[in-house]
Amino acid sequence: MTVIAPTKTKYEAVIGLETHCQLNTATKIFSPVSTNFDSPPNTNISPICLGYPGVLPVLNEKVLESAVKAGLALNCQIAPYSKFDRKQYFYPDLPKNYQISQFDLPIAEHGWLEIELVDAKGDEAQRKKIGITRLHMEEDAGKLVHAGSDRLSGSTHSLVDFNRAGVPLLEIVSEPDIRTGEEAAEYGRELRRIVRYLGISDGNMQEGSLRCDVNISVRPVGQEEFGVKVEIKNMNSFSAIQKAIDYEIERQIKAIENGEPIFQETRLWEEGAQKTISMRSKEGSSDYRYFPEPDLPPIEVAKKQLEEWRSQLPELPAQKRDRYESEYGLSAYDTRILTDDLDVAQYFEAAVAKGANPKTVANWVMGDIAAYVNSEKLNSITEVVLKAETLAELIALIEDKTISGKIAKEILPDLLTKEVKSVQKLVESKGLIQISNPDELDAIIDKVLAANPDKVEQFRNGKTKLQGFFVGQVMKETSGRADPKLTNQILGKKLKG
Amino acid sequence: MTSIRELHKQLVRKERSAVELANEALDRIQRLEPKLHSFLHITADSALAQAKAVDAKIAAGEEIGMLAGIPIGIKDNMCTAGIPTTCASKILDKFVPPYESTVTQKLKDAGAVMVGKTNLDEFAMGSSTENSGYQVTANPWDLSRVPGGSSGGSAAAVAAAECVVALGSDTGGSIRQPAALCGVVGLKPTYGLVSRYGLVAYASSLDQIGPFGRSVEDAAVLLSAIAGYDPKDSTSLKVEIPNYAKLIRPNFRPRGRLRVGIIKETFGGGLDTVVEEKVKAAIETLQHLGAEIQIISCPTFSYGLPAYYIIAPSEASANLARYDAVKYGIRAEDADNLVEMYKETRAQGFGTEVKRRIMLGTYALSAGYYDAYYLKAQKVRALIKQDFDNAFEKVDVLVSPTSPTTAFKAGEKTADPLSMYLSDLMTIPVNLAGLPGINVPCGFDDKGLPVGMQLIGKPLGESLLLQVAHAYEQATDWHLKTPKLQ
């Protein structure tokens, strides 16, 4: 008798991301007030940021430029006619009790972003397009500081800091094209790379200048209908996004299999406990009573202006990756490491521009230099004393055999910490130039052989392992400056007799 | 009744000083306020300081502008730095803005002497100034009657000569209707001509600041001083501002063929017979002056009122959400939590009419009702605009009564908001279309109460509007009559 085991249902997650990205404009979106992040509470404020009676918003043109450039970089259609709307809800951090946002006519729509997933060295990148539903401009709210608790519940009173009120935000909404935590994290990373490449945001998740909310539901593979959507908030790193999603997928599948209901709700990612917890029910969505903002005229981006902004777009991360692979022959993995941070990519390109071999530069940048940046906890490769041009010179000296790779590694700590005008002069003054003159090496090797007649005897009697001993002696004699390849060649010949 | 031009001459010739003018106005305010209640705050100290500065300039032989040294009243919904600005609302009791509205800054720069802040219907919502959270202003022609509203304080103060000119704001008729009921000139400019920066918002897409004067020329002088593009107001228009007063001097007569259209829909049911008579007589006067009169139909005109009572409260419901006790204004004592604080403060701070309009607007914008109310009202607004556009293809200026009635008794309409709303039937469509409109006194009823005629112009047609109004005024002597207050 055969028992047919029931086939286990396979599930897939349907995930969309809503990202808020703070722009790095000098002043706020609707008032000429500084956006500085770490000023004392309520110092970057004005009657406009505080929604005083009678004051009016005036759009910071730089915000529109940033939004349009982001829209273009995300392959969106830029709306020829767009407008602002008021989104109404009462909350103490929202000075006017409405947020100036964009509702039905956002500045950009219908775009996409391509993510690449590379698991390990040598793998081909897996590419996937994630649709961008829309991108719009809005003002940030202030911040509540709860006394006596880090949450509202349990606090004795709350203080309001309006410094953040009116800081410009882009809200970027993805299509529900994401299926895994890894894809979501990579989508977030790519988005951050794009805004950083554009120079419109610092994309710092810890400081909250990039905030991602996740919408996620689970359904059996093959089912068209979506499952019940849950929103997850409070992830302050991309790995937290990945982990929160992975946790949530598992939780929802388990619930379905146990016949438990999934509620439409907002859940919070608890970094400490590594799980999501229910925050509030979302059933019966809130009514924001949107209507067109009468204090701001509609936005019409002229064709000429649009083309000007388009022409100012830099090479974007995906374009850079393609170029590094095709032009420099770098692997997908190396390419991704080099292009992740624009400063690193620019450093790499500056060294290559000086004629250094791209693969060699890549190895230095990803190896010793990256290790140094990490160990010194530097913010950016731009803080390293060793400039890209100097690295290129160092590489050139290795390639033309002026110094050995070994010597290069020895002098690197000096180069990383002290400014050096010419590596050539440094190695000359330190007497570190490689000995690659066969005659010079001949004499040194003869001297070494003459000093060790017994070892020579043993070698000739078959103990060929001793070649390493002789190389060591030559290196000792030359303080490591002997060309290792040439030394081996000459030694081999001489030892054979 | 001395005009700004005459006062200016006297100042320049040193026949009178600015301090004398200020003191005269302040004395008169002192004497009349117990009966009139036009002013919420009297700013005697700053007025005298400003007047002294003007006198010093004159003494030093410096040139002064037309408004220098002229006593002026400012409606208390325009922010004045360091001086209370309450909008006649308890919720802004003792609120002192740290910034100056663009219009008052311009007046300060011009040397005008602000004698005080005038009463209004709370947040400019009303047609009788009875909705003030502080006091009820009387009509100088009959103290038992209302001055109209919402700029009733400014209209009464000008009619009673407590100041020479005043500023009001007009969202649905709040300058023109009280001007009519008080027998003075009041102009609502084209939307965007005057900056709204510092004007406490009622309905942002309709609000517009404008002048009151005892003559068209005085109103024109004040308009020239406050109009113009302001980078702080994104809805303000980038246009050149003519010297309106110069355009109507000396005595302008319409040259060539001036085409005046009577709006058919404004003469019908609900209109007082005496108002109809007086306005029709005024139209005849215009005809005698050479205007060609036509009857024009604006079929959507009567839909203005319902559309307005969707759009204006909708915007107001958002504009007034900021009064939440978190940042400024009053805060209810002993609220246990945040929501209680919101509810109690707003319950105590806002008056009945303001609450009514907040509720109307909140309802109209709610999910499921937005399309049926707000969106439909916006469509009506577009149709009204179109009707006006069509009319202005045939005529240069439109004419109608300003208010369907003369001044009514205090308390007469407070129990029936709908009958109160009808006071603005004639003026509201002009705001919805963003057009300029002016009230010119055109007679008195049998009780001696003023009747006003409304002239409506094309967008930015203020010059022609003022010219026609001035020509009419010069041909009549209604503006020379003054209320017997003593």
Image: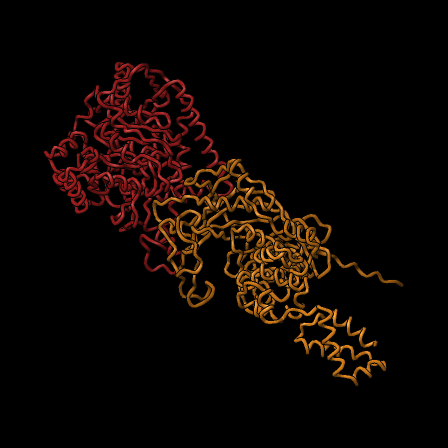
Q: Can residue A303 be seen in this view?
A: yes
Identify the colour of chain B in the image: red
Residue B307 position in % (x across, y down)? 42, 33
Name the one closer to the observer, A70 or A216: A70
Query: Split into 4 quadrants, where in the image is the N terminus of chain A?
Result: bottom right
Name the one closer to the observer, A400 or B452: A400
Q: Which residue is drawn at 73% across and 50% down?
A: A222
Up-down relation of residue A103 to residue A216 (above or below): above
Q: Residue at x 68, y 51 (%)?
A: A327
Q: Which residue lies furthest to the bottom in this view?
A: A454
Q: Is residue B72 left or right of residue A203?
A: left
Name the one closer to the observer, A138 or A326: A326
Query: Split into 4 quadrants, where in the image is the C terminus of chain A?
Result: bottom right
Identify the colour of chain A in the image: orange
Name the one closer to the observer, B231 or A452: A452
Up-down relation of residue B72 to residue A70 (above or below): above
Q: In which quarter of the image is residue B400?
A: top left
Q: Quadrant of residue B127?
A: top left
Residue B202 position in % (x across, y down)? 36, 41
Q: Quadrant of residue B351?
A: top left
Residue A191 position in % (x across, y down)? 59, 52
Q: Can residue A278 be seen in this view?
A: no
